[in-house]
Image (cartoon, rainbow, N blue to C red):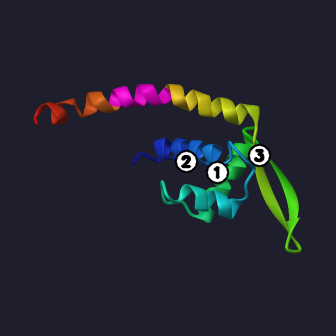
Amino acid sequence: MDVQIKRGLLDVCVLAAIKCEDSYGYKIVKDIRPYLTISESTLYPILRRLEAADMLTVYSVEHNGRLRKYYRITAKGRQRLMDFHEEWNELEAIYRFVTREENNSD
C-alpha cells in the first residue's frame, strides 16, 4: 500500500479510536489491532503529528504511581473524521472503477 495513503488511514484510525473516550497509547493499539496491525513505535509519531495538527490534546493522569498520557480528540480531529466519511465515498468509486473489469469478467 502506498505510504501516504496508509499514513492518512492510520491517522483516521487513531482519531476513531479516541472519538468516544479519551485513551492512552497501549489501549489505542489494543483497540485498533482487531482491524489492522499497529505497534506502539508506529503509534507515538502519529499521536505527536495529530497533536501538532491540533487534532488531539494530551494530558497526564497518575496511574500506579506513574504518569500516563491520555489523548483527547479536538473539534478539528472530529472534523477530520467527518471529512474522511465524505472522502470514503470517492475512494469507493475509485475502487469500483479500478476493479470494474475484474468484476465484469465473472
What residue is pinned by disc 1?
46
Which percent across, then down, holds residue 82? Answer: 60, 29
Disc sitting over residue 93 in the figure: none
* Tag 2 secondary structure: helix
Tell me which residue sits at (87%, 60%) in the image.
61
Amino acid type of disc 3? Arg
Quick check: marks 2 and 3 in contact, CB under 8 Å?
no
- Quadrant of the frame with the C terminus: top left
Residue 87, image x, y percentages:
49, 27
User: Which quarter of the figure has residue 76?
Assistant: top right
- For the residues labelled 3 and 1, the Cα–Cα distance comes to 14 Å
Label whose residue precedes the other's in the sequence (3 or 1): 1
Q: Which of marks 3 and 1 is in front?
A: 3
Figure label count: 3
Quarter of the image for residue 80 reads top right
User: Relative to 22, is 27 above or below?
Assistant: below
Quick check: is 53 in the magenta stretch? no
Query: Considering only order in the chain, which callout, 2 or 1, is on the residue closer to the N terminus?
Result: 2
- Marks 1 and 2 sit apart, C-alpha to C-alpha, by 8 Å
Name the spot of residue 13 as percent of width and height, x first. 57, 46
First along the sequence among labels 2 and 3: 2
Residue at numbered disc 2: 10
User: Position of 93 compared to 31: left or right?
Assistant: left
